[in-house]
Image (spheres, rainbow, N blue to C red):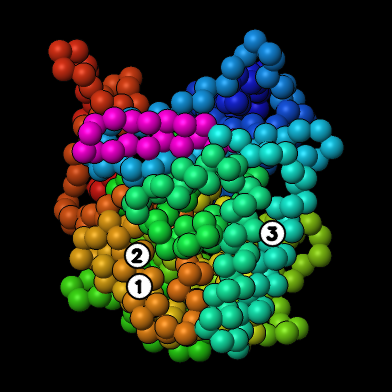
Amino acid sequence: MSCRKTDFYHGLLDPRCGYSTGGKLPPQAARFHLIALRPGTTKITAELFVGQDFQNTLEAEVQVAGLGDGVRREEQLRLPPRPVPYPEIVLRIRTEWLEDSACRFHYRLKRSDPRPTFIQEMEYHSDPFHSSQIAKSRELLRATVEDLQGGLPEDMRSRLTAFGRYLYGNLFPVELQVEIRNLPPTAVLILADQDARLPWELFHDGKRFLGERFLVGRWPWELDDQRVYEFPVGAVNVAYYANVEQPEIWADLLEPPGAPPPVPLPGGMFRDLRKAEVMRGLHLIRWGQLPGASGWQDAPARVEDVHADDDMESGVRPAKLSLRRNRPLVTLGYISAGRPELTTLEETWVPVFTRAGCSAFVGPLWAVQPAVEAVFTGGFYTALWSGASLGGAFRAGRQLAREVAPDSLDWMAYILFGDPMARPYRPVAGQGYAVVEAVGKPLKEPIDPGTEARFRITLRRMPPV
């Protein structure tokens, strides 16, 4: 194993490492593009697999240098051409770390209007605040969700509104508050870095929640180059926790008219890593935890009861997912067991599956009523199978959930991580597939008329993403 010195330029950390197989095969190179959020020393860990067999863990310690005064970070929101329209509003949120654990948010708003063809781009930044305020907002959300249980509808909405107005007034600069109030209802894509994990959909402008006014889709800024605008749909694999009774009833919601039947994983568990390689969709079902209950042993990915760190890692490793081949849509059904419970969606579920390679992730911020979950899931997958965009299907599911439980705010718990304008497609069965690629050009980069290009044609047994 040999690694060249890493370079830090315009926020892009680009280590290139070569792995030698002892002379039996020529050295192979793996390239990683990492986004550095702040300067300092950090450790990079990578696991090396040959097929499904684990070979080794590679570790490297890197020093990220700060940007000098003469170096300017590339701030433009580049939107390359694609066959699917972009959301009319793209809001990029980046965290700038200051001294003494203080930070502030930098906002870049790109607005396009298809009627008079123009693109307007504006930049804002919040006042400095202590980083503990982000953790405080999560605790406020937890307390608010606890207050929502068993209250009158008007009281529940009033408490959630107070929480949303607190976030809106403290984390959005005044100029951005005014701009957002003047925006027409439309699709909004929020690209936020990992330090800006906040319930942006619950921000309240004094009249409505942002999740009510806009069709909001979120995506990690660090993974923006992996955000897809087309994704496959087909039979949905179903994984579930051991405390879910009659999982087949919930699985039936994933089969709209004309769609192939869902595929429950044996025992609800990920036992065969190859299953992840052919997934078109994945739905996770979890029942809320009762006081004192342990969820680890009930999880779809089992953790053996071991004590040594090495043994724990080897026990978990076979269950890790590799979803990059088909980029499936992943949804989470988190059903309330009768007590208030946050799902830690943004801290645990979303990072795991977006980094593993899913095309989008949909789930609730808190555990929802069974009736709300049933209607949302059924409506979402029905609209998706009928050809609606990702955001359109998400909106249809939320509207149905709102109608079936008008006295509940559980429909507002659902959030979308993905491009709201992304569209589904049904892979066509065949004996082989021909893939045409331009040599030496990125897959998504268009070829200008009048230029020369060489092409490579490959035949595959599996349909490409």
Query: What's under tag 2, amino acid-wise?
Result: Arg
> Which residue, given by chain and number where applicable, does mark 1 sit on?
399
Residue nearer the viewer, 237 or 313: 237
Q: CA gap, disc 1 to disc 2? A: 6 Å
Q: Is mark 2 on a helix, strand or loop?
A: helix
Residue nearer the viewer, 20 or 452: 452
Q: CA gap, disc 1 to disc 3? A: 27 Å
- Disc 3 crowd, CA 10 A, few/some/many (<14, 14-19, 20+): some
Q: Where is residue 444 in the image (x, y as percent from the top left)?
A: 31, 31
Query: What's under tag 3, amino acid-wise?
Result: Ser
Q: Which mark is residue 137?
A: 3
Please state if 417 lies on the left or on the right of 305 as rendered.
left
Q: Look at the image and tell me whether residue 367 can be seen.
A: no
Q: Do the residues labelled 1 and 2 touch (CB within 8 Å)?
A: yes
Q: Position of residue 258 (x, y in %)?
A: 18, 73
Looking at the image, which residue is at 52% across and 31% down? 123
Q: Is residue 314 above or below residue 256?
A: above
- Disc 2 crowd, CA 10 A, few/some/many (<14, 14-19, 20+): many
Residue nearer the viewer, 355 or 142: 142
Which residues lie in the magenta part?
A: 106-123
Q: Residue 395 carries which label?
A: 2
Q: Position of residue 162 (x, y in %)?
A: 62, 66
Q: Does the magenta stretch include residue 117?
A: yes
Q: In which quarter of the image is the N terminus?
A: top right
